[in-house]
Image: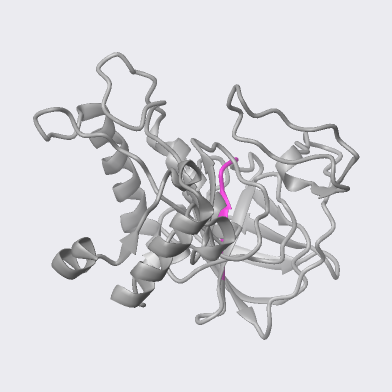
Amino acid sequence: RELIAMYHPDILWFDTPGKLPPEENRRILAAVRAADPHVVVNGRLLGNYGDYKSTADRPAYFPDTPGNWEGIPTTNESYGYSQFDRSHKPPAHFIRLLAEAVSKGGNILLNIGPRGDGLIDEPDQKILRGIGAWMKRNSASIYGCGRTPLPVQNWGTSTWNPTTQTLYLHVFHWPQDGKLLVAGLQSVPRAAWLLAGTGGAVTARRLNPDDVEIEFARPTTAPDAADSVVAITIQGNLAANSARYLDAGAPTTLHVFDGHLTGTGVRYGDAKHAERACGVDSIAV
């Protein structure tokens, strides 16, 4: 009550409610709602009683999670600053992780631990600058966007803005022949362009009722090594065939998180030593 009254937070983020009895967590949640019903409460307080679901720590990929959810990556392997932890990932890792999260309806909470003098360590600054530079050119593909019904694509992922009727293709693996197959897109594309404004003209043509081909005027060079974004305005509603396309001419990765788990004997864990996946009944891809 004191924190809410003095600082008027937008969110209270609970991390270890499992160490308290359930009745104490219910009392805390009731106190938050009474003090300010507009304060957002994360999903680690009383599980599904929060305003959204908190998923894995330090994720590198995401399963398809219904509803509103959040993943919690770290710039290295530590949640606080550690002078011995030099395992920082490149900015491209987080740019792609952000696109993957939005494409599945989620949010990213990036953990960065300041040093003892209050400064952000230089490797962390480098990561933030890299993300910021990409967002400066491509933020339209993130803000206001969410899930698409398109199936998993070999070249990357996609996000959808229903307000502007714009589909954004996040191309992680640039096609060497300058032709990008958008599998499962049944809607009519009206116009296509590179969001960052570099790389020349872009054309879209339908190959069959389910697939659209995007062709680039400058085929050999990716405009952005991490994530080149193609914007496509769609005529009418966004419709798709959700079946996964298998390309005979290129490798196809079948990620376990892209499958649909059935039965009661399997779950996803955080890859921590105390958490082991149960026996698999079946995984449908």
Residue 201 position within the rendered picture, expressed as x and y whole percent measured from the top left: 51, 61
Q: Residue at x 51, y 41 (%)?
A: 221
Q: Residue at x 78, y 38 (%)?
A: 254
Residue 276 position within the rendered picture, expressed as x and y whole percent measured from the top left: 70, 28
Find the magenta span and give its range: 167-173
Q: Is residue 172 magenta?
A: yes
Would residue 68 be found to the left or right of residue 142 on screen? right
Residue 93 position within the rendered picture, expressed as x and y whole percent measured from the top left: 47, 36
Can residue 109 be spotted in the picture? Answer: yes
Q: Residue at x 37, y 25 (%)?
A: 88
Query: Looking at the image, which residue sits at the far top?
Result: 84
Q: Residue at x 72, y 62 (%)?
A: 150
Would residue 215 be found to the left or right of residue 166 on screen? right
Residue 244 position within the rendered picture, expressed as x and y whole percent measured from the top left: 82, 52
Q: Quadrant of residue 249?
A: top right
Can residue 224 be spotted in the picture? Answer: no
Split into 4 quadrants, where in the image is the N terminus? bottom left
Q: Is residue 183 magenta?
A: no
In terms of secondary structure, what is the magenta stretch mainly?
A: strand
Q: Quadrant of residue 84?
A: top left
Please say if 183 is above or below 156.
below
Q: What is the count of numbered marks? A: 0
- Colour scheme in the image? one colour
Q: Nearer the viewer, residue 102 or 280?
A: 280
Query: Looking at the image, which residue sits at the far bottom?
Result: 236
Q: Nearer the viewer, residue 110 or 2?
A: 2
Q: Nearer the viewer, residue 183 or 66?
A: 66
Q: Nearer the viewer, residue 101 or 50?
A: 50
Would residue 285 be found to the left or right of residue 192 on screen? right
Q: Quadrant of residue 116?
A: top left
